[in-house]
């Protein structure tokens, strides 16, 4: 489907007019049936054709066949960096997966050093909808293992993670900075894939 979104008028008709991401793909890429209230929450920001413009823009930003060039180059750079960095990484693996299918999962496990793979069972694309508690538990367990294996006092480590926000991107969210542009001292000490 991705190549279709690059063409006018098909991408416009499918995404902005037909609202295919929320009316079809959300349901097909989630294992469980979403409640009406959950579907309403997803749809709330996009009630009109005009309000769905950002939804239509997103797939145009996803690198496909080398385009857009800047985004392709950025993602390729991340991939190369992840293949050489010894930074601890967590891979939450779901099956059958969509973007990360069996072959891609095998490549991740083989190609990325210092990675911990956690098999999380069944999942397609919107795994946060199928297994939110499991995902949180697996991340906490892995982070606890990572933190306990480091020599810094735990309160200092926790403060470090609290302050590694996405401020470089103008965001203020409570999670580590996962900007993987280059392997410098300012880079995160962990990645969750």
Image: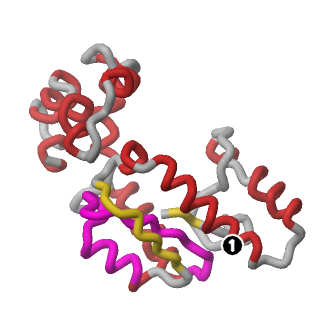
Q: Quadrant of residue 60?
A: top left
Depth check: 107 or 61 in front? 107
Apparent side of residue 153 relative to residue 163 in the rendered image (left or right): right
User: In the image, what residue occupies the spot 18% across and 41% down?
Assistant: 5
Q: Position of residue 54 (x, y in %)?
A: 36, 30
Depth check: 102 or 69 in front? 102
Apparent side of residue 89 relative to residue 99 in the rendered image (left or right): right
Depth check: 50 or 143 in front? 143
In the image, is residue 93 part of the stretch drawn in magenta?
yes
Instruction: State the extent of the magenta-drawn residues as a range.
Output: 85-109
In the image, is residue 173 part of the stretch drawn in magenta?
no
Q: Position of residue 113 (x, y in %)?
A: 51, 84
User: In the image, what residue occupies the spot 73% across and 54% down?
Assistant: 164
Q: Quadrant of residue 92?
A: bottom left
Assign a secondary structure to mark 1. helix
User: In the image, what residue occupies the spot 39% across and 43% down?
Assistant: 129
Q: Quadrant of residue 179?
A: bottom right
Q: Position of residue 189 (x, y in %)?
A: 68, 69
Q: Position of residue 72 (x, y in %)?
A: 35, 60
Q: Above or below — where is 165 with respect to 76?
A: above
User: In the image, what residue occupies the spot 60% across and 75% down?
Assistant: 88
Depth check: 98 or 34 in front? 34
Circle 1 is placed at which residue position? 146
Q: Above or below — where is 36 with respect to 115?
A: above
Q: Residue furthest top?
A: 48
Apparent side of residue 25 relative to residue 37 in the rendered image (left or right): left
Tell me the crowding category of disc 1: few under 14, some 14 to 19, or many 20 or more residues within 10 angstroms, Cα based.
some
């Amino acid at each position: 489907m991705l190549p279709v979104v690059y063409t006018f008028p098909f991408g416009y008709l499918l995404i902005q007019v037909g609202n295919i991401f929320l009316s079809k793909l959300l349901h097909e890429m989630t294992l469980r049936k979403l409640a009406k209230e959950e579907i309403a929450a997803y749809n709330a920001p996009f009630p009109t054709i005009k309000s769905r413009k950002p939804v239509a823009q997103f797939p145009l930003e996803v690198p496909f066949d080398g385009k857009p060039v800047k985004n392709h180059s950025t993602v390729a750079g991340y991939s190369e960096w992840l293949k050489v960095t010894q930074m601890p990484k967590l891979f939450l693996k779901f099956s059958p997966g969509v973007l990360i299918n069996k072959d891609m999962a095998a490549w991740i496990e083989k190609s990325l050093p210092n990675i911990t793979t956690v098999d999380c069972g069944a999942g397609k694309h919107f795994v946060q909808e199928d297994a939110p508690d499991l995902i949180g538990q697996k991340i906490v367990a892995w982070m606890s293992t990572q933190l306990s294996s480091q020599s810094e006092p735990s309160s200092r480590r926790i403060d470090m993670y609290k302050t590694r926000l996405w401020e470089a991107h103008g965001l203020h969210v409570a999670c580590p900075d996962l900007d993987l542009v280059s392997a410098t001292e300012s880079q995160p000490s962990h990645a969750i894939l």
